[in-house]
Image: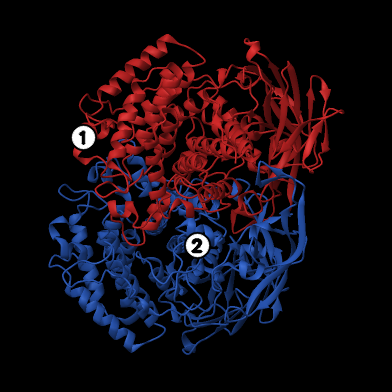
Chain colours: A blue, B red
Amino acid sequence: MHNFRAAGALQEKSQKQGTAFVPPKYSYRGFNVLPEDPRAPKDDEFYGFVFQDSDFAKWIEAVGYSLAPHPDPELEKTADEAIDIVCRAQAQNGYLDTYYIINGMDQVFTNLRDHHELYCLGHLIEGAIAYYEGTGKDKLLRAAMRFADYVAERFGSQEGKIHGYPGHEIAEMALLRLSEVTGREKYAELAEYFIDQRGQAPLYFDIEHPTPKGEEYKVDYYHQAHIPVRQQHEAVGHAVRAMYLYSGMADLARRTGEDALLDACRSLWKSTVREKMYITGGVGATHMGEAFSFPFDLPNDTAYAETCASIGLVFFARRMLQIEAKREYADVMELALYNGILSGIALDGKSFFYVNPLEVLPEACHKDERKMHVKPVRQKWFGCACCPPNLARLVASIGSYAFTENDDSLFVHLYMGAELSKNGRRIRIESGLPENGKVKISISSGERKEAAEGIKLALRIPSWCEEKYTITIDGKSLSRCEENGGEPCLSNGKEIVGTVKDGYLYVTVPDEETLIGMEFDMKPKLIAADRRVTEDLGRAAIVRGPIVYCAEEADNGKGLGELMLDSEAPIGEVICDDFGRKTIALDLLGWRCSPKEGNEYISLLYRTWQGRNMEELRIRLIPYRLWANRGEGEMRVYLNVK
Amino acid sequence: MHNFRAAGALQEKSQKQGTAFVPPKYSYRGFNVLPEDPRAPKDDEFYGFVFQDSDFAKWIEAVGYSLAPHPDPELEKTADEAIDIVCRAQAQNGYLDTYYIINGMDQVFTNLRDHHELYCLGHLIEGAIAYYEGTGKDKLLRAAMRFADYVAERFGSQEGKIHGYPGHEIAEMALLRLSEVTGREKYAELAEYFIDQRGQAPLYFDIEHPTPKGEEYKVDYYHQAHIPVRQQHEAVGHAVRAMYLYSGMADLARRTGEDALLDACRSLWKSTVREKMYITGGVGATHMGEAFSFPFDLPNDTAYAETCASIGLVFFARRMLQIEAKREYADVMELALYNGILSGIALDGKSFFYVNPLEVLPEACHKDERKMHVKPVRQKWFGCACCPPNLARLVASIGSYAFTENDDSLFVHLYMGAELSKNGRRIRIESGLPENGKVKISISSGERKEAAEGIKLALRIPSWCEEKYTITIDGKSLSRCEENGGEPCLSNGKEIVGTVKDGYLYVTVPDEETLIGMEFDMKPKLIAADRRVTEDLGRAAIVRGPIVYCAEEADNGKGLGELMLDSEAPIGEVICDDFGRKTIALDLLGWRCSPKEGNEYISLLYRTWQGRNMEELRIRLIPYRLWANRGEGEMRVYLNVK
């Protein structure tokens, strides 16, 4: 088991835009209640959802990540002022959730299940740490610590303390991070208490909210509080909560090295990605409770696949990667990021999807109440505005997901333009992804040449290239060979220069300037879902590298369900100018199928089967993350295959 | 426009079981709250739903229909006692809905939208008439008239009266029938008022229940009260309510001969059966409001297709037939009866479906909240027990749907074993339907030979035979020819003996004993839905005559979505003994398809497309109405076609 740190602090000028991944433009100032909202806040009234405080916390977190590489005095001033306001609201005892501060402190912690005080604590901690790390200012961090201190006083196994835990998880991972940042064990112990206590009998939420017989399981299941976490092997309940809990569990397992907890994390990971994940990286298939459905139940048109849940999946994946560098975690992280997460925001950064379906018929969204959670175009804002600031904090800290490090190695999980340093060496990454599979990594000695040391790079070889890749070091091609131990490795013809393990190429870079070139095969291909996903039987999605494609009405007309792919047809890559920058679209020949008109059976709606009309046509596909940027229309990821 | 009476009174020994259609055995005594129901009724408390009185009314209606052909003193005694109890509850002013009688008469008619007083009135009238016609006893009928008199006093356009109408329709058709039975115009006028007033601005329900802005339309739409009925052209809202309203509108149009109202009925019919009807005769595609969805939105797995709604469709169809003898109405009536209605009851008559889906994966019904309205096996009882007694009253009065008459003609819409009389002639029908397409109609002079006259029969030629039929009169085959006017007709080689119009063969039977033989082609065939039904693209259902078939797990194993039909394969008819009597099942060769295993893409859940494994196998289909009589398992009506 490796032990890693996330590479947030490691980036010198992290997230410098390289040749490829350009984070969507996103205005932090946009977070206002829409002018037409009639519920204007009043001075002495709490406004919004009980967890509304977390909006500030997510925003300040994104600001913190952003200020490190992109200093912006005006933004920092706004943030400082907001922090002043928030800190002034803190109670004497350290408590800091304005819902109860305004409505009555005598009721604090009486509704852990539904009132998100501990969720707000978690976000406050995450925000405070990011702002501290981004600016060096610790005012908010100290406020968050005081709130955490107060919670630590009130919760625990001792008599007289509350034996509860968060209704909506996040405090677990936040407290573990706070413990790492501050060096204070007590925060880790509190996180551990929340994790260990969850699901222990008698179930806390059933005591707090006496629940009708037969309903308890359902309610506790929704909160991942039905059984102790080490016995949980299936991802269940509210998907965002689940992802946040599992992330916290992984953090704790990394800290303690406990096998039972790590085993639970591995099982929950497998359950999530091998049975309950859309090909877009979306998780949480049903809007009923914004939750996971049963294994292999992945309907395309009623999908929920909340943007926040995919973000949570990235949190979980990064934490599993920090424990064990296996590429499946990074593959999933990349898949979710480039598809089901970025689909959550419009190209202009001004509108958002909460729900990320894989099949949309706009008429159904407007008229069928079963699909009213599915929006055919992005919305300017939401009553529950969790996704937009969650996206902001993820994108602004993307470097800590792309790269992690341990004492001797720098791990490159996602290839994106960046400048990093490690052991005094300067590492510059230029990446063509996701447009092309070319990556260039230049390692130099940096400014302080005397301090430069050899470093080890661990470079992910994405599974999507199906082992079709080339690697050069200083222009010399490496070839694959088998080491004595049978471990695959790469040779420059003279000597072994790298080994491959669990999908990572480990290469030691000597104390010289070095240039590593990589190219991963990105040939588009058809993908079939497991046969147990009944929705997708006989259908395929088309992918190119980690990018999932979809068909839109804008390119293919109405009636996308009538399209049929020819699995033998070559798939052409074409440049499409529809999205403000050159985008690779895919073209292939296929058919539009419709039933030949037979005799009427009972009503004009039904006719005897006379075969199909097959009209040959060119089908165009665009990256899924870009759908619904050209107005309202049908969209489908899975198409029928002949 | 023809004017017909329904042939309820016309049957001498109506519904004698002929060679074919055997109504499922059904115990009228079975209507008890299940023993495990914890909500035991108390003497002085109203128990159950606000419309619980209607359960009695539907039951007494079924009893009335049943007693005419099947005298049963014990059942009649039980019914008389129940009637005594109900009549004792009637208020001095005639009001008779026990919810308000128990809870406070000062509140009557203050919540027309949600409290079903006028619905209970309607059912009471229907029940009272049936019992009166079945037994000659008028105690309940007089009670129903007193209640109707009271309602007539309270409702109407005059100042001081209530300008409302039923939240759940049925009183309209019931009052029109009461007017026919009693000869009292006032009941017809009250029905007309309810129909005319519905949807007039200002909308009554919005006044009664001040509704949040923007919500009114949705609420009124649900009640078919969004616009005046003559402007309604799309079937919308709660499907049972819609069917009952349209039935009442048709009754009124028949009475008044008003074109505008009839046009609305025709439009609503077309909207229902040409855009919103499942191939099983199910209507109301969504459980959200038990309602119609938008045109061509007919999902199979989340279907609602309530048994009662299909029963309502039969009501509407019979009434349209009474206005104009066009076979589409009878075709639909037959389709609904033999498929989506009879599927509502188990073979042993002891359990019921409220919802009649066209595709079932039991795991989804148990675990996916989006499909929890879909039950994979029939239920013993329901909290809202509308369907079982509705089924009972339909089945017990089926003769009035199979046959209607006007002054000179007897119309045979549905072929089922029966003995009827008309103009002193005795007509005996033996029918092989739905097992085979052979029908024998013997016309004799009956017992009172002196009174026998020539009669005209109008015999439906079902559209499902695609004009493949043979007809003999006294053994001589008739051949088709064109009369001078171009109207198709049938000749015995010497003379024209019948004409065909709108799908009915009109034949005049002279004053002699006559034997008419008919045979309709019932070759099984594949049916495709309209291409706008996206769910069914590339799929077909298999039918045989009016019988829709389905595949079950019991015959075909799990994974019915993997089955693929060969549209060229011959379809064999085989006798199946699984259902207590010989049933025609269908066998045809097809394939079980599954994706060939390609390379993993990101997760084991996704693999590169390598084509399909096609395992040839025999696919067995059984009549849809019989599904779920062999335990819990998957079921599908539509299967993929190669």
The amino acid marked with disc number 2 is: Asn
The subunit carrying tag 2 is A
Left or right: B440 with respect to A144? right
Where, by quadrant of the figure, is residue B322 drawn?
Answer: top right
Return the x and y of residue A206 as percentages of the image width and height: 27, 43
Say which mark, if any, is on residue B103: 1
**Chain of the residue that carries numbered disc 1 in the rendered image:** B
Q: Nearer the viewer, residue B45 or A525?
A: B45
Residue designated by label 2: A356
Can you see residue B609? no
The answer to which of B331 and B90 lies nearer the viewer is B90
The residue that appears at 13% across and 65% down in the rendered structure is: A93
Query: Callout 1: 10 Å neighbours few (<14), some, many (20+)?
Result: few
Seen in the picture, residue A310 relative to B570 is either above or below; the reply is below
Element class at badge 1: helix
- Is residue B223 positioned above or below A409 on the image? above
**Residue B80 at what x, y percent from top left?**
35, 16
Above or below for B421 versus B292: above
- Label 2 crowd bin: few (<14), some (14–19), many (20+), radius 10 Å: many
Circle number at residue B606: none
- Say whether residue B212 is left or right of residue A26: left
